[in-house]
Amino acid sequence: MKRTLALLLCLALLASVFAACGGDGNSSTSSTSSASSQAKDGESSETGTDGEDSAPEAGGEAVNGTNPGNELPIVTEPVTLTIAKERHMLDTTKNYNEKASFKNITEETGLTLEFVELAAGTAAEKVPLMLAGGDMPDVFWGLLSDAQILQNTSQLTPLEDMLETFAPNSLKTYEELGTDWRTIATAPDDHIYGMLGRYESLYENTGDGIQIINKKWLDAVKKDVPTTLDEYYEVLKAFKEQDPNGNGEADEIPYCFSEDMWCASITNDMGIWGIGNGYGDTNSNFHIREGKVSPTVNTPEYREYLEFYHKLYSEGLIDAEGFSQNTEVFSNKIKNNQVGTYYSWTALEYLSSEQEKDWVVLPTLAAKEGVQPVANGEVDRSTIQKNKWVISSQCEHPEAALRLWDYLARDAESKLTVALGEKGKLWDEYEDGSGYYFVVPEDTTPEFTFEHQKYTYGTVNDPPLMTKAETPKNDGEISPAAALRDQMVAQVDKDYVPKDGQLPQSYVSPEAIDDRTFIETDLKAYIKQFRSQAIMDGFTDADWDAYVKRLDDLQYSAWLQWYQDFIDGNL
């Protein structure tokens, strides 16, 4: 009876999710032409920018109504595909069909696209319901984790036998990589369920959140950029006790953070004590050097970290709402000139190009002499992501769904249009045809920042895979603001996690994932709960001892061993 009720609930919720899939307003039928697909000087849209074929044609007749290779239209008869995609909170379009890559997709391919757009922050809840209820879209775009792939292989379409015929452009890209792409893409059952996406390597993405500090506030309180923890503390005190924003009110928040914002967590600061693996909630709970995994959150260094931030909290030097506020509240405090320092992608995330000039990077601090601090990033990090485009077993035309992705991957300009919108806005081509460069408009506003523009015009991190040769440059001579992120990374990258401290990109078995999930669900929740409580309320020796013992009871050592086995290839 309980199973029946649960299934009925899943189906009811799925009905509400798919209600947005109606033909009105959400299918791609506009005749407006996208910039990347227009032919140049009489060239076919099936050729690359140099006039040569971007990928070899795959011969043969249509299969299941789908033409092979690069032949257009993709289908011999009209086909509708449903594509599930999570909407980013900064996306200001009404639906995905407004984006340049899809405005004339039906005329070009014969496909009508109906996007199942999940509201920002809801994918973690709604995707499992889709998988559990069995009423799935044709395609999951950038939604499924490794674990969800491996636990639902019967509901997904293996792609490896279709790649040569229906994805020649993607296959050509993969074979140009400086790494074995099949090791990344192939699941333990020897099938490939998802297409690769994002960039092979992008310097700005080697880091995550980088701490920036308001230079205008520093000048107001007559302080230099701090280089030691003691200097940092004195700066925060000055921000609190004086009036650096000049409004006559005691509304300053010296240090603002948000556990809801992916790059602004207070776990970033563990690196000041030389612990953690550079980024992310999970990675803060272990430390890897020379291939060996060691604990972080039961160490003397971690205790010192908690004690220091409790001191800041008790003195009103860090945001009292940091553990509970959402990203909107967090960003509004920054926009309102209430914040002295925080972790960010760049200040352009929430501020105008003019306001951004008030902010500078805070160098990686060390808690004391002899500590090697850890910054939030990895040296030469690969930014390839698997499972960007996963086709469900319910898709009646999987060949067409695969060819759609490959059509988007037909050349660098098409990929860039998927990522950042039409040519000339956020990216452009050098006049000599030698490559591409990123553009940051100079007329951004707090209401429509550069980050808004990225997620409005494109999908940012969800395009078909681009090689290093295809990836635009951040050319400061052409677009100074475009080089801002690279400049930020350069100031802290000496402290990024080295290669011997990075996790591999390979799959592990479903059973191993189950073993880890069984341990970490309660373990991570307890670590997070104690961290927030310790920083807000403080703790005694007895509290610390009880905490360490509880970690043992929750199998912290076994969880660390799981990651050691992962690195050693034993899973």
Image: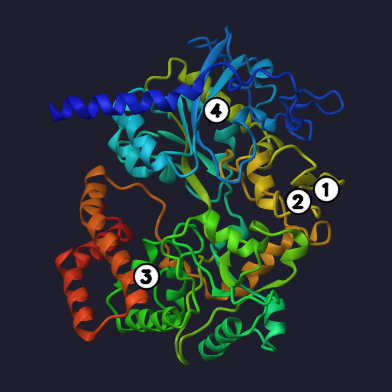
Q: Is residue 227 left or right of residue 426?
A: left
Task: Indicate which label's residue lies in the foreground, 4 or 2.
Answer: 2
x and y, in percent, of residue 28 in the image: 62, 21
**Badge 4 local density, few (<14 within 10 Å), some, or many (20+)?**
many
Identify the residue position indicated by label 3 in the image.
288
* Mark with earlier residue (3, 2): 3
The image quadrant of residue 489 is: bottom right
How far apart are the alpha carbons under marks 4 and 1? 28 Å
How far apart are the alpha carbons under marks 2 and 1? 7 Å
Q: Is residue 41 left or right of residue 529?
A: right
* Mark with earlier residue (3, 1): 3
Number of labelled discs?
4
How far apart are the alpha carbons under marks 3 and 2? 35 Å
Cβ atoms at labels 4 and 1 below 8 Å apart: no
Name which residue type carries label 1: Tyr
How far apart are the alpha carbons under marks 4 and 3? 38 Å
Instruction: Judge whether 374 appears above or below 166 on screen.
Output: below
Dot 4 falls on a residue whose secondary structure is: loop
Q: Is residue 91 left or right of residue 121?
A: right
Cβ atoms at labels 2 and 1 below 8 Å apart: yes
x and y, in percent, of residue 38 in the image: 78, 26
| Viewer-proximal residue among 358 and 388 | 358
Residue at image x 47%, y 75%? Answer: 374
The answer to whether one can see residue 136 in this image is: no
Looking at this rendering, what residue extends furthest in the left direction? Answer: 1
Q: What label sits on residue 430 in the rendered view?
A: 1
Name which residue type carries label 2: Tyr
